[in-house]
Amino acid sequence: MSSDNEQDRDRQRHGCSARMPERIATHPCYSEEAHHHFARMHLAVAPACNIQCNYCNRKYDCANESRPGVTSERLTPGQAAEKVRAVRARLPNLSVVGIAGPGDPLASPERTFRTFELVSEIAPELHLCLSTNGLMLSDYIEKILHHGIHHVTITINAVDPEIGEQIYPWVVYRRSRLTGRSAAELLLERQIAGLELLRSHGILCKVNSVLIPGINDEHIIDVHRTVMGLGAFIHNIMPLISSPEHGTYYGLNGQRGATDDEVKSIQDRLTGSGRLMKHCRQCRADAVGLLGKDLSSEFSLKQLSARSPRAESLVTSSLFRDENPKIRVAVATHGQGLINEHFGQADEFDIFDVSSEAVTFSGRRRVEPYCLGGHGDSQALAAIKTLLGDCHAIFVARVGEGPRRALHSVGTELVERYAGQPIESSLRDFFQSRRSEKVAGTALTRNPVVKSNQV
Ligand code: CLF
Ligand code: SF4
């Protein structure tokens, strides 16, 4: 975990991309530049909430981090982990996994922390991100530190309980239900304490505020000064989205939403007084992809189970019985268009889709090399297995028996016979030979371990 000084350095360096620390430079919400290149995914594992915001109807996603009116699939921690595996295999630029609803993650702490634990096991390189109303932050600081959660967002809409009570009708804290002014006092006090605590442990904190016309619009200036003074890294002022059909208290009582011009006007008044996030997309609790390019509809549970890596990755009879078969392969190369990298030393694989018509490059996936300093790293191998789980074969200059067996166990074949040869013609040859074998009825059997000279 980084220190206060480290976070101060992060803040000073932000804006100088050449020196920006990795945890900022690769987080699409903490760095405006990063959002063009790095994807995040949200895991909708937290259904409950411990407060009521007047802009929220919990039939929908948490309005703090999502567009009201967009429902999400609720996931168990296990389903969430499977989803991470699948998304990571498809999106090599995935850098962040966040839990942001559909309720408050710290109102469902077991589900939230179990999910982070599973994600860390299968994808230790991803940043973990948490978005909360802040009520329970101080209670779970040890867990947050234990799980290595480096980015926390707190939604703070007011620092004055008189304004807070117009936003929060009730709060449940340690089995007591508070209403009115005392509810707002407790929540605001705990939000501030949570922010201070996170900062004291060097965690990067973003503060979100919902701009509510006529209620906290002028007050947002005080909120900004307070949270930046306490060391928030960035402040994200988001417009209230309010409509009667959302069924929220505000929506049903004629409270209008805020316009983009109103948000901009407040942002302009705050220019120079602390970093402002201006590229927020108020995303769904199950958002996937680059900000503003949501791919969540491609990763529903139903779709994931229909294309599990194991089912897709086997070069089976049925695949080559298709009229237009197509396979996906990975290639270890360090250039010149050749298959010339050892499996254990590869820090990236080029991915190709191969059919009888074409060999098409479809992207590059970075990995931690399996073999560093002469020893195989089982964690790196597990990550490669997951990352290349949709590939039918991996072409390498050389590979040891251990990784060969491990990849075979998930239906991925290691191919050495084209070592040193051009990629494109080798992939064509491999495809055609597999297809001919199939036509001739001498199908490749996937389960036995195939030695390199037998492939
Ligand atoms: Fe998600 Fe939030 Fe983490 Fe980003 S979103 S938990 S910090 S990874 Fe980003 Fe989406 Fe705006 Fe949130 S654009 S709603 S600020
Ligand atoms: Fe809704 Fe989120 Fe507020 Fe809870 S914290 S009431 S889920 S907007």
Image (cartoon, rainbow, N blue to C red):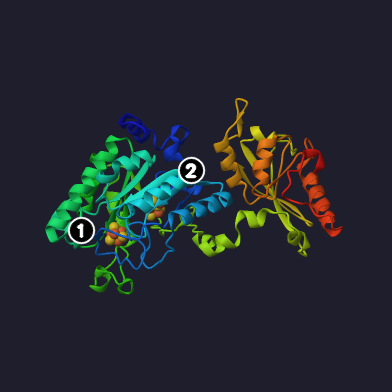
Mark drawn on residue 117: none
Residue 272 in view (yes/no) = no
Q: Which amino acid does the dot numbered 2 rest on?
A: Glu
Report the residue at 30% width, 72% height from top.
Answer: 247
Q: Where residue 263 sits in the image (x, y, percent)?
A: 31, 56
Residue occupying the point 70% across, 48% down: 329
| Total numbered labels placed on residues in the image | 2
- List x then y, in percent, for residue 403: 65, 38
Q: Secondary structure at mark 1?
A: strand
First-in-chain label (2 vs 1): 2
Residue 171: image tag: 1
Q: Amino acid at mark 1?
A: Val
Q: Residue at x 58, y 47 (%)?
A: 386
Asked if marks 2 and 1 touch (Cβ < 8 Å), the reply is: no
Picture quarter with the C terminus: top right
Q: Decide which of 438, 35 is in the foreground and name it.
A: 438
Q: Residue at x 60, y 44 (%)?
A: 385
Which residue is more in the foreground, 161 or 318? 318
Quadrant where the N terminus lies?
A: top left
Label drawn at residue 121: 2
Classify 383 as above or below 362.
above
Characterize the local packing of mark 2: few (<14), some (14-19) or many (20 or more) Cα atoms within 10 angstroms.
Answer: some
- Ligand 1: does it lie within 8 Å of the C-beta at label 2? no
